[in-house]
């Protein structure tokens, strides 16, 4: 299922990005996450994260009211690890994403700084939202606008 989704995403992205002659790379994080040893991951990566600092992040504050699953709580660490691996495999030094991902992206920048003493960067853009200001998604209704 994951491999099928990756191919579908690549097919969509080929309309905008040239993947020929290694001009662009579509990396599948399943390549490094599928065989991840959880105990080693906690020891090598988890030690660089403070639970108190994570819970203070904006991305968790809103979820705390409705309940935060353990899977959701780990998302920041996993995204940070993705950036760490992309840096090691492809010399990726900048993450781009929606402004709702800021805390997760900074976690990756910090992980590279703490583990490797490397500089890395993150840049966000404003999310498209519906007319009520809610994040665009399959259940959102109404016209979509870009908020400054």
Image (cartoon, helix red, strand yellow):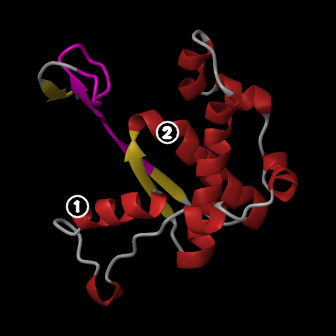
**Is disc 1 placed on a helix, strand or loop?**
helix
Most extreme residue toward the left, as rendered? 143
In the shown orientation, is residue 37 left or right of residue 26? right
Residue 87 in the image: x percent, y percent? 58, 70
Instruction: Tell me: residue 134, above or below residue 10.
Output: above
Count of marks, rendered view = 2
Residue 103 image offset from top left, x and y in percent? 56, 37
State the residue in front, 51 or 26: 26
Q: Residues within 10 Å of mark 2 (few under 14, many from 20)?
A: some
Which quadrant would residue 83 be assigned to in this image? bottom right
With 38 as the anchor, is 78 left or right in this view?
left
Q: Is residue 40 left or right of residue 36?
A: right
Residue 137 in the image: above or below residue 131: below
Q: Magenta: predominant secondary structure element?
A: loop
Return the disc, 2 or 1, that comes first in the chain's sequence.
1
In this view of the protein, which residue sits in the foreground, 39 or 99?
Answer: 39
Residue at the far front in the pictured view: 1
- Which dot, 2 or 1, sits closer to the camera? 1
Q: Which mark is residue 12?
A: 1
x, y percentage for residue 16? 18, 65
Residue that sits furthest to the top in the current view: 65
The image quarter in which residue 25 lies: bottom left
Q: Nearer the viewer, residue 72 or 17?
A: 72
Range shown magenta: 123-140
Q: Quadrant of the N terminus?
A: bottom left
In this view, the residue in front, 146 or 44, is 44
Q: Which residue is mark 2?
A: 102
Q: Please give the name of the residue rendered at 77% of the width and 61% of the height, measured from the top-left corner.
A: 115
Magenta highlight on residue 138: yes
Residue depicted at 69% across the width and 54% down the height: 111
In the picture, residue 148 is in which quadrant? top left
């Amino acid at each position: 299922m994951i491999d099928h989704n990756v191919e579908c995403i690549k097919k969509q992205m080929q309309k905008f990005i040239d993947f020929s002659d290694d001009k662009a790379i579509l990396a599948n994080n399943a390549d490094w996450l599928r065989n991840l040893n959880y105990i080693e991951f906690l020891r090598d990566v988890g030690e660089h994260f403070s639970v108190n600092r994570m819970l203070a992040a904006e991305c968790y504050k809103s979820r705390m009211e409705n309940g935060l699953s353990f899977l959701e709580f780990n998302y920041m660490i996993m995204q940070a690890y993705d950036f760490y691996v992309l840096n090691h495999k492809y010399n990726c030094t900048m993450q781009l994403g929606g402004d709702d991902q800021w805390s997760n992206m900074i976690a990756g920048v910090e992980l590279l700084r703490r583990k490797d003493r490397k500089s890395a960067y993150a840049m966000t853009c404003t999310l498209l939202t519906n007319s009520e200001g809610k994040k665009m998604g399959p259940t959102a209704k109404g016209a979509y606008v870009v908020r400054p």
